[in-house]
Image (spheres, grey):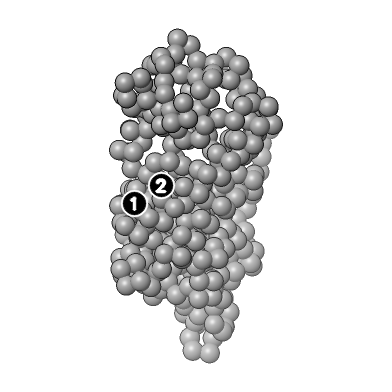
Amino acid sequence: MSYQIPSSAPSLEELARRQQNVITASQLRARGVPSRVVSEHCRRGGPWQRLLPRVYLLQTGTPTPEQRMWAALLYAAQNGREEGRRDGAVITGAAALALYGFAAVPRLPAVTGVQVLVPRQRRLRDVGEVRIQRTARELEAREVHGLACAPVGRAVADALREWTEGGALDSGVLGPRLLRSVLREAVAATGPDGRRACTPAELIAELREAQLVEMPRIRAALDELLAAERQFVLGQLLELAAAEQLPAPLVGPELRMRGGTFVAVPDLYWPQAAVAVEVDSAVRCVSEGEAAWLRAGQHRMEYLGVRVVYLDADRVATEPAAVSEELRQAFLAGGADVVELLCPQD
């Protein structure tokens, strides 16, 4: 039987280095620094300063933007970062987007407020530039420059809600171009593994949770984003089909039964093989009503014998060889017992 000696807590010097010289009262106390010493060091002319309740900066001078972020997070997390916890608090909203490096939002030095997400049961109040936001959902965190941030989709939704409640959308301060840029950057950002940090489906889910989808300006920007995403994915699929020497499929045809009964509008369709391709509905639908309409069409196609190939948009980009083979096999197999369908090209 082996026994692993537990690692000791970091020293005050090591902790200060990790947290950019920002320390909480309990962290100081745990390392043997009495409260009276902290008070003496924070007096006028002393070497330390108080940034927020129970949060101190172990240096003089104006704190850097990163130190302000650390202070906000430590104030809300109650020492969660010291123990490696990620469930105490996360930075979200515009401050998180600045940390992620979004070009559409003000750079980090210009961020005047820090929005921090905490569990609903936490008893905290806004103080200084720190705004506390509570959530009943389990907190998720992404490490950005050593700081715990909300995932990209959640941070975007919280930023848009913050700007909406502040009147930026209604007053025109947040223009359509800036709004579109924020949404584009959200789905364009990639993680360390090369995959998207936020998929369109995740972004829509967060905006829907924040009750922002039905706002006209946000809905218009989202529709434009999804239309561009869908066209890009369809372009990739057409290239893959051409590389497999498959006939050119119809793009977005309206399929009807003889007599005029509407069936569906698939993304791609090979009439000679009765094969349809449907890209993930996340790049086509925003509301549940739209998704239900799309699913109904897919079910009708399958019922009438059409072979329907369902593809995830991200998989088209990350696994092109596998997608190409799937398209080829589907075309060779074709549909079964297909009811005669008409489309505009007939």
Q: Are dots 1 and 2 in contact, CB under 8 Å?
A: yes
Relative horizontal placement of residue 164, taking residue 91 as reference (left or right): left
Which label number is shown at residue 143?
A: none
Q: At label 2, which amino acid type do we have?
A: Ile
Q: Position of residue 67 (x, y in %)?
A: 54, 71
Give the quadrant of residue 257.
Answer: top left
Residue occupying image coordinates x 42% and y 71%: 113
Instruction: Give the secondary structure at mark 2.
Output: helix
Residue occupying image coordinates x 60% and y 50%: 190
* Residue furthest top in the image: 337
Q: Position of residue 25 (x, y in %)?
A: 47, 68
Disc 1 designates what residue? 213
Relative horizontal placement of residue 90, taking residue 208 as reference (left or right): right
Residue occupying image coordinates x 61% and y 39%: 236
Disc 2 designates what residue? 204
Instruction: Give the secondary structure at mark 1.
Output: loop
Q: At label 1, which amino acid type do we have?
A: Val
